[in-house]
Amino acid sequence: MPATIAIVPSFLLCSPPVHGHVAPVIELGRGLVERGDAVTVLTGRRYEDAVLRSGLAFAPLPAEVDFDDSDLDAWLPGRGEAKGLAAVRQDMIGMFARVLPGQWRAVEALLASQRFDGIIGDATFTGLAPYASRPAAERLPVVGVSPVPVVLTSVDTGPFGLALSPARSVIGRLRNRALNAIVLRGPLGPIGVAVDEALAEVGEPPATMPFSDYPYRSYDRLFQLSIAGLEYPRRELPDTVRFVGPLRRRKGVRADGLPAWWGDLDSGRPVVHVSQGTMDNHDLGRLVVPTLRALADEDVLVVAATGGRPVDEVVRAVGGRLPSNARVEEYLPYDELLPRCDAFVTNGGFGGVQRALAAGVPLVVAGSTEDKPEIAARVQWAGCGIDLRTGTPTPGRVRAAVRRVLGEESLRRRTAVLRDRMDALPDPVDIVRDALIELAAAGSAGDANGPSRLPNERPSVSLRTLPIADVQQIEQAEADYFLRFLAGASAPDREALGIRTARYGGATAAAMAGDPTGYWSKSIGLGFDVPLDRAVLTDVLAFFRASGRQSALVAVAPQVLPDDWDAVCAELGLTASPSWAKFACPVDEFVPGETDLDVRELTAHDTAAWARIIREAFGMTDPDLTPMLRGVFDDPEARVFGAWDGDELVGAGAVHVVGEVASINTGGTLPSHRNRGVQAAILTARHAAAVEAGCRLLAAETGLSTSNPSYRNLVRSGFTHHYDRTNWLWNA
């Protein structure tokens, strides 16, 4: 059995080490992993734990382009002193332009050492610019996600950073043309110079467009994590840009993890939340403290989040005692809090604004750093809140704005409209993933990182010539052991799991009614002694349907695909799913491996421990494999070997003998014992069993990524990657 997680597409996600950019990238990565994909995140070391906790692989940015966004003054001395366009210029050069060469070198190294099927970059991750600018046929698909307002230069908008409303007249557009030219050549001119210097360092020509425009014009797709109703219209916006709404959080907070005062939210008073986010929160006297003071005598409940700053700072700032209507925490669960709020006072962080709108909460925005003035201006333009046009409002201005937000029905009504538009959008993770698959199918991937392995691409016929007779033996040996594997369970176990099997010549079709993974319902081996035509496929799909399956896989060797396969797929509803790499090794060419652990053959008493190995190694939770694995020990042509660390079984793998072929399958190693030669040694034991049985050929399969440990183990052991076999997905 191949590793069901390793065989799916592998994506590289890239983000600068800034919380507002890393957080959505991690959330997107979690969504991809939940769909079975493999994800590696390239970002700063400060976020390593967050990446790993989300089940993603972590790749660090080089030290020379890594920085701590909680202390940006250390990275950009004097940062807090710059204002307006000068602050924009300093941030753009220091955090985005200057780091381009180091970021690109990190991407280049990953592409050289690992296999990916597509790249997803934060829109501000400039290190992808050299790669994204290549012709699409010479690289992998590259899509962007943008957790910031649209910054594309346009005659409809003024220069980004001035927070001007969009133009509605010819005069206004003429103003914008002039201002854009002046600002790009004047105050923001040094950004272009810094970008050209960075590009020259990596051997690239000067930029052909303003720095702010490149994500919109270079990426294959750019996904704006917002809705069109919150963004100024631009006639220049490419059709490759799509508004997909904010990413949807995937885990809530248990009731026992809520603050003790949580019940106060149900007091009947309006709830006003205030926060300065997690970056611009060093001085809570800018907004949090003025808001507490402004609303201390109002009939509202004020809930403040410090973004990680000690609550004592707030208590001291308000005179040593919080107002009676104030509740303050370092962090709060927005999924639970925001739906209970009536207003949100914020400094304008893009993510927080999106989440408030998703909950239907109108806003009071007081932002003056980074892109926050632009976000504040968009909130007021969209009619879902008030822009205070300052980052340090007085208590009186905050009080007046909150009263207006709580009292004006039009603001609440417009916010509700935006919320409903967000709710109507598909899940952004599905949109991004589908786009990568579409791009790969269209051929937007090439030699730079190997051919794409995403669904709907026709598989290569052969990576190294293998006689068709050997291909048939390998495919039908797998079909045979798969049948024996499922049918070997006891009758009550087969009934409980809803297992059904059928033979079509040397091919097998199997179905498990209650299998949530989809792995156990498929056909293998068609196209050799049974023709691969519409009649046979119709019978196989009818078998799946009668077995209670709504989906199943048809695994077909590329050597036997008929010329009209595309038409057959269209007629019967088959679409390409990820491929597997098919390996073979003559028994006399096998290279033995070693480990310091104890390797020996398993018995039926070890079934539960073997099942644990498979569950943990492949991230499976259902179904319980124990009934099926138990039956393997009753198969005279099957043997199972394992590696022990003391009394603990830490790795295992089976071999099924079918004629001249020994099929290597159902192997895995506990994560705690990887990189100790476990599978290489177990492969060696299975090779010895194959020799003893008189086999001529060892056969195995794994995921297509050359960075996959199973792939590397097979190559080191003398196996050759001969062909890629696509799994064709049928959905009822």
Image (tube, rainbow, N blue to C red):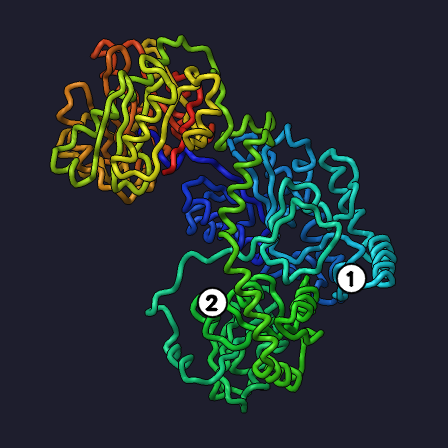
Res 514 visible: yes
Q: Residue at x 55, y 53 (%)?
A: 22
Q: Residue at x 45, y 39 (%)?
A: 38
Pinpoint residue 480: horizontal percent, then vertical percent: 25, 20
Tell me how many marks there are: 2
Disc number placed over residue 86 in the picture, else none: 1
Asked whether 648 or 332 is in front, the reply is 332
Mark 1 element type: helix
Q: Residue at x 47, y 88 (%)?
A: 324
Mark 2 element type: helix
**Is 203 on the left-hand or right-hand side of 353?**
right
**Is 188 on the left-hand or right-hand side of 390?**
right
Pinpoint residue 527: horizontal percent, then vertical percent: 36, 16
Q: Is residue 88 above or below residue 685?
A: below
Asked whether 346 or 229 is in front, the reply is 229
Pinpoint residue 367: horizontal percent, then vertical percent: 66, 70
Pinpoint residue 261: horizontal percent, then vertical percent: 39, 79
Q: Is residue 347 above or below residue 268?
A: above
Res 685 visible: no
Image quadrant where one finds the N terminus: top left
- How packed mark 1 is, by other alpha carbons closer than 10 Å (few <14, some 14-19, many 20 or more), is some
Amino acid type, residue under disc 1 in the picture: Ala
Q: Residue at x 47, y 69 (%)?
A: 331
Asked whether 471 or 243 is in front, the reply is 243
Q: Residue furthest bottom?
A: 297
Image quadrant where one finds the C terminus: top left
**Distance between the Cα atoms at labels 1 and 2?**
33 Å
Image depth: mark 1 or mark 2 in front: 2
Q: Which residue is mark 2?
A: 334
